[in-house]
Image (cartoon, rainbow, N blue to C red):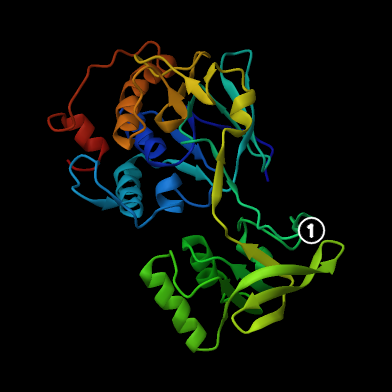
Amino acid sequence: MSNVPTETDVVIIGAGPCGLFTVFELGLLDIKCHLIDILDRPGGQCAELYPEKPIYDIPGYPVISGQELTDKLMEQIKPFDPKFHFNQQVDELERLDDGRFRLKTDDNEEFICKVVVIAAGGGSFTPKRPPIEGIENFEGTSVHYSVRRMAEFEGKDLLIVGGGDSALDWTLNLAPIANSLTLVHRRDKFRAATDSVNKMLALREEGKIDFLLGQMTELKGANGQLEAVTIKGPEGETDVKTNCLLPFFGLTMKLGPVADWGLNLHENLITVDTEKFETSEPGIFAVGDINHYPGKLKLILSGFHEAALMAQRANEIIYPDRKVIFQYTTSSSSLQKKLGVK
């Protein structure tokens, strides 16, 4: 990883719906963005926790799923070429002498920007640890809660546990490069996309992966290296040989390092004004579920509104000498050109 900081106009912490729409509002003002998210994909809660759950209060869509909304937002911001940095958490945030901000992630990436937008939903997502005795002894060596670089799992005997999208997606992606792969789930019904389930079942029929019905009860190995995992199923216990375990048991949400950045908080949420959605620290904004103000409603459409007003103030910080004339996308030829529709 290069130690040269990435310089940009805005760093957005969180790539959920509100973070993605923030890219759109800033893009209309020619403001460039980098987004950092602890997950391995855009969409936040919508994509990770309920990709197929219907949402009924997005304007213009009588019903839309979390994944469909994410896909539409990604399509909408494509003209602005945002840069994404997944599987990372911002650990450090400081103001430099020139007024800009320096951010550093747990993957040792550094960013320098003029504006920071916190769009982290309920906070950072932390993978849930399976309730298996001694699992912490294997974490980071042979137990992993996310996949940052697929090459690290090449030639491994993989055991994936879970029945959601993450478990199924990584089963499909890692099966071609693994030495062997076994998927374990406590029941034969899955919470993943139907297409992914069908592809997984096809791989099992072809003998390319194994599937076991059951739950983990014990990890076996020494010095951080797994040798086998005991699975308790309908017909009793069996040991599955493995040197790499990927458990996908869902996520918990925590405010995380944000709580230590000196921002005014209200019951673990970030206090903002309702004119600019700026925090107690000038140049740092918060939009979406992570912010608080009188009358706040935790709705995606509220976050969209907040992003629009926030962008106007961000523009004043980034381009202090530029006067912006408010324009509508329906009638402005210059905005339509930016969007690639004229």
Residue 250 in the image, given as x and y percentages of width and height: 54, 54
Looking at the picture, does residue 171 appear above or below residue 9?
below
Choose between 242 and 128: the one closer to the eye: 128
| Quadrant showing the C terminus | top left
Give amino acid for label 1: Gly
In the picture as drawn, the residue positioned furthest to the left comes out as 331
Residue at left offset 64%, top offset 24% = 260
Q: In which quarter of the image is residue 148?
A: bottom right
User: Mark 1 highlights which residue?
Assistant: 134
Q: In which quarter of the image is residue 136?
A: bottom right
For the residue carrying disc 1, how many other residues have a C-alpha within 10 Å: few (<14), some (14-19), or many (20+)? few
Q: In this view, does 20 lie to the left or right of 212?
A: left
Q: In which quarter of the image is residue 160?
A: bottom right
Can residue 340 be seen by looking at this rendering?
A: yes
Looking at the picture, does residue 222 appear above or below residue 287?
below
Can residue 43 be seen by looking at this rendering?
A: no
In the picture as drawn, the residue positioned furthest to the bottom comes out as 206
Looking at the picture, does residue 270 appear above or below residue 241?
above
Residue 144 in the image, given as x and y percentages of width and height: 67, 58
Q: Is residue 24 left or right of residue 172?
A: left
* SS at badge 1: loop
Residue at left offset 61%, top offset 56% = 146
Residue 92 in the image, given as x and y percentages of width and height: 65, 29
Choose between 133 and 337: the one closer to the eye: 133
In the picture as drawn, the residue positioned furthest to the right comes out as 223
